Image (cartoon, grey):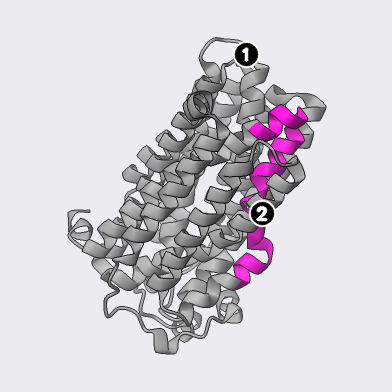
Amino acid sequence: MREALRNPAVRRILAAAAVSQVGDWAARLAIAFVVLDRTGLAAGVGVAGALFFLPWLGPGQLLAGMGDRLDRVRLLTLCEVSRAVLFGVIALFASTVPVWLLLGSVAVVALIDPVWEANRAALIVDVTTSEEYSPALKMVMSTGQAATLVGWAVGGFLVAGVGTGGALGLNAASFALSAILIGGVRSSGNSVRSRRTGSFSAARAFLGADRLSAIAVVTTVGFMVAAMAVEVQAPVYGRAIGLADRWIGVMIALVPAVTMVGVLLVPTGLADRRLLRWGFAVAGCAGLASAAAFASSHVVGMAFVAYALLGAVFASSTLANIVVGRRLPVTNRAAIFAVVQGSVFVALSAGSILGGPVSDLVGAETTNVLFTLGAAACCLGGSIATFGSRGSTEDDHAMSNPTQSIEGVEAVS
């Protein structure tokens, strides 16, 4: 990791990710509380959470490929400036406008997320060497989890201390600072922009040709639906068991806390097949333990244990990112990231939406047990699938060179 940290571009990407995500996750919790207080519906909280992911279903996903044709750093800077302005406006009127207008505003600003996420991920490849890439990706993801942890943890305290408008205003300021940081990134010669076409068909061809990447994506999509249903409904669940709002934020923060530890412990030196096999197996066992803890939530402290274990399930998404990321061709990086991340965000949207109605129907505690069992089943299934993914040892390593083309991928598969 030290080698990657010596790269000034990596340091700036890390810092930008950290400051913007701290404010963003605190703001998401603030919006969840606003919707819950004004509607009284768990389904409303689910819709609010889903709005941050739904852009991946359409326009946002299409926009994400722009970085393969435009200057990526300028595009990312524009994303952050735009989000700072839009969230500043939302902060001024969040407590007074109708709920539908608040949610509509959130949906508009969320359109920027796919552009930012896909092109930031592609920029990491652009600014790192092949030796720096995996450590840099781990650091970016662990920093993101740390920022999410802080955002969730302080979100409840911010709402209690400065109100929802104050929390959302701080989010706007965090995006402004992120724009300054990302604007100073200088891309290296690793970028091969002249060969990029932004082709989504090429991205689908890559995933269709590489079975291990397909297993990683499909498994992640499956457990993300279930795990996100549990995470988004945390404000509902926390109030159902009698927690104060400030402690609900701390409880949710345990998810990214454990995820961050899991990211740091991921052994990137393992072959791709083995990394997926053991990582998904551990995540599946953590999911089963989380379901058992939710079933025992009448015992003091078990709710906190359950959410901590859920973090171990989320940590396995890092495995998928590493495996797919280091098997990517140099062409169409942002387009491929958009397809892969789009699938994941569709899953997050589905989980956010499903959790609310189920919670209204059977109760928050039963909902959490059912969905964590589902997440465990998906992870264990993904682990088992790697045993059936036949191929030579070369298949585990041949695509680890990020300069390979789509044609090379098809040849070794």
Q: What residue type is labelled 1?
A: Gly
Depth check, front residue: 337 or 281: 337
Using residue 369 as the reference point, say whether residue 5 is left or right of it. Answer: left
The dominant secondary structure in magenta is helix
Q: Is residue 230 visible?
A: yes
- For mark 2, give the secondary structure: helix
Q: Which amino acid does label 2 sit on?
A: Ala
Using residue 214 as the reference point, say whether residue 77 is left or right of it. Answer: left
Residue carrying label 1: 242
Residue depicted at x 49% and y 32%? 155
Residue segment shown in magenta: 34-62
Q: Is residue 141 visible?
A: no
The residue at the far top in this view is 299
Q: Position of residue 385 (x, y in %)?
A: 57, 55
Q: Marks 2 and 1: in contact by CB < 8 Å?
A: no
Q: Where is residue 250 in the image (x, y as percent from the top left)?
A: 47, 25
Within the image, what quadrant is residue 207 found in? Answer: bottom right
Residue depicted at x 36% and y 46%? 142
Residue carrying label 2: 107
> In the figure, 391 relative to 83: above or below?
below
- For mark 1, give the secondary structure: loop
Residue depicted at x 76% and y 27%? 40
> In the figure, 234 relative to 413: above or below?
above
Residue depicted at x 48% and y 86%? 407
Which is more N-terminal, label 2 or label 1? Answer: 2
> Is residue 61 magenta-colored?
yes
